[in-house]
Structures are given as structure tokens and as C-alpha cells.
Amino acid sequence: MHFTGTIWRPPYEAYSLLIQVTAGCTHHSCKFCTLYEDLPFKFRMSPREEVEEDLKETSRYYNKVPRVFFTGANPFALSVDKLKTLAKSVHEYFPACQSMGCFSRITDVTRKSVEDLKELRALGYDGITFGIETGDDEALTFMKKGYLAKDILEQCRKMDEAGISYNFFYLTGISGSGRGNIGAKETAKVINQLHPKIIDASMLTIYPTSELYKEIQAGNWKEETELEKLEELKTLIENLTVDAKFATDGASNLIQVRGNLKKDKKKLVRFLEQQISSQDEAYLRKYRENLRHL
Ligand code: SF4
């Protein structure tokens, strides 16, 4: 199998067949991001032969794969034609495959029309994960995410229209000290107008190799305290009105919460309130500082 560098996938793709079709990120500019720094290049599309070889190899062991997840930060950046070719190859080796997903940037949808997206849906693309991080324009701009809240709305509405389901990653802490609750409310305003199936929250962990670390050293940005991050998470859940699964999976989260926003919202909020009143900032901070790797 061809895998380059650390492979990231959403926790809910644990049972999907992982196939590398890209490595790295086309954007590679978010100030907090160190995810693909172990790669010697910014972005690479896998040669067709590599993908074919991997599909062939895996099809020898598993013939009834229901879902394939294409790895890389944003394989959805590939052209519609390339995505179609990939889907056809998957169906060739795995005729029982029902869907294909991947990470995507919001801007990867911009150049695709609703008609394009419908064609991709018909070929099996579904459950695309967007690391939107936040709906707070101030934070999106400062962190150089390369889009604004209005773009999240515009592009995800196209996904809705095309019938491609999607999930969001939220980054607790991205708004910075004193702005966590503002960021959470701004994000809820955006998400509440859309239809994500899963909202997965991670917590900002800043590594010395990031551009954000330099901004902090220069006094241009201040990190939220760990308790503030928990408050922000509570505010986000309180303000979300969508019927979606919510989870804080992954090591960056100090506390794991998981449930359905419609059914379990009160329980999730109560749990976070208890945690906020009983946790100790110094203890939580130690956890963060000891996180060597995400
Ligand atoms: S956060 Fe995502 S979009 Fe931004 S640089 Fe990292 S991988 Fe690329």
C-alpha cells in the first residue's frame, strides 16, 4: 500500500477502506496547522497506477467493502473528471461499495457546480468532511483559513442541493482568549442554516513549529485557557439547533462528550457544566502541554 506521512482520518471513518489519492494540503497556510509538516512537499496527487495498485491489493483481501475513504487533507480539490475516474476504479474493484468520502476544504466545492456535485453523488460520493473550524470571520481571517462564513453557507447549500451529505470539524479555541463564546455563537448561527450529519470538535493545541506559535510569541494573539475552551464548547452545543451527532473524539479534547444534539443536548450541557465547575486549569493545562502529537 502507498501511504505517505501521517495519515489522518475522521474517527467515524474507522471502518472505511483507506486509499491514498492525495497527500498533503493544497492550501497549507492555516496558522495553527502542523498536520502535514512531515511531508517533503505541500500537496501531491497520487499517480493513477499507485491508486490502482492499492485497490487491486486490498480487493484480494476484502471483496465486500461498503465504504472507501480517500486520504489526504483535501482530495475533493481534484477536478470533477479525476474524481469520476477514481470512483469508477473503486467500483471496478469493489462492486458492492456504496459510498466514498474524503476530507474537503470549503473552497474545493467552489469550482464545482451543483450539476457536477450531483454527478459525483450518483457515483457514490457522500459523507464529505469539512474542517470548517469555525463560523467566526475574525478567526477565519486571522488564521488564514482562506474562506469566510458566507462561503461555508454558499458551498454547503450546493452540497445540500446535490444530495451529498457532509460532516463538520469544529476547532475549539480558534477564536482566541476572550472570544471563545463569541466564536461558538457565530459558528452555531452558520451551522444552524445547514444540514451536517456529524459535528466533531477538536481542541486547539499549539505546537512550536506553527505560525500561530510565532504570533503568540510576538504578542499578536492569546490562547484561551482550557476552562474557557470548555465554556466555548458548552456555548456551541447550547446554541446548535440542528439534528446532528456531536462528538469530541480525539486526543486534543480534554473531555469526551458524545450524543445527538436534539435528543441529548441538555445532558451534554449539564455534563460540561459539571466539568467546568470541578476541573482544575493547571491540571488541564498539563494535559495539553504533554500532548506530543495530535
Ligand atoms: S487546517 Fe486543513 S486546510 Fe488548513 S493547512 Fe491544515 S490541512 Fe490544510
Image: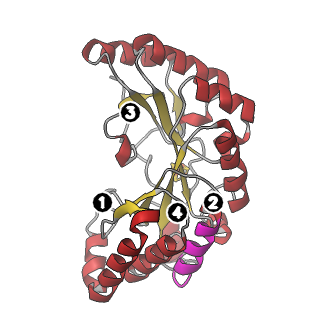
Q: Indicate the secondary structure of the residue bearing disc 4.
A: helix
Instruction: State the separation of the CA atoms marked 4 and 2.
Output: 10 Å
Closest to the camera, between mark 1 and mark 3, is: 1
Q: Are marks 4 and 2 in contact (CB under 8 Å)?
A: yes
Q: Give the residue at x 54% y 73%.
A: 239
Q: Give the residue at x 47% y 37%.
A: 72
Which residue bears the numbered disc 3? Answer: 4
Other-residue count near label 4 (Cα within 10 Å), few / some / many at <14 / 14–19 / ≥20: some
Residue 53, visible in the rendered structure:
yes
- In the rendered view, tell whether residue 267 sits above or below residue 115: below
Which residue bears the numbered disc 4? Answer: 211
Q: Amino acid at mark 3?
A: Thr
Instruction: State the separation of the CA atoms marked 2 and 1.
Output: 24 Å
Q: Give the residue at x 47% y 71%.
A: 237
Which residue bears the numbered disc 2? Answer: 144
Q: Give the residue at x 64% y 63%.
A: 190
Query: Quadrant of the image for the N terminus?
Result: top left
Closest to the camera, between mark 3 and mark 4, is: 3
- Residue 65: x and y in percent read 35, 23
Q: Mark 1 or mark 4, which is nearer the start of the sequence?
A: 4
Q: Mark 3 or mark 2, which is nearer the start of the sequence?
A: 3
Q: Indicate the secondary structure of the residue bearing disc 3.
A: loop
Identify which residue, 100 or 267, lies in the foreground. 267
Mark number displayed over residue 251: 1
Q: Are marks 1 and 3 in contact (CB under 8 Å)?
A: no
Q: Which residues are magenta?
A: 176-189
Residue with the most extreme front position: 263
- Residue 6: x and y in percent read 35, 42
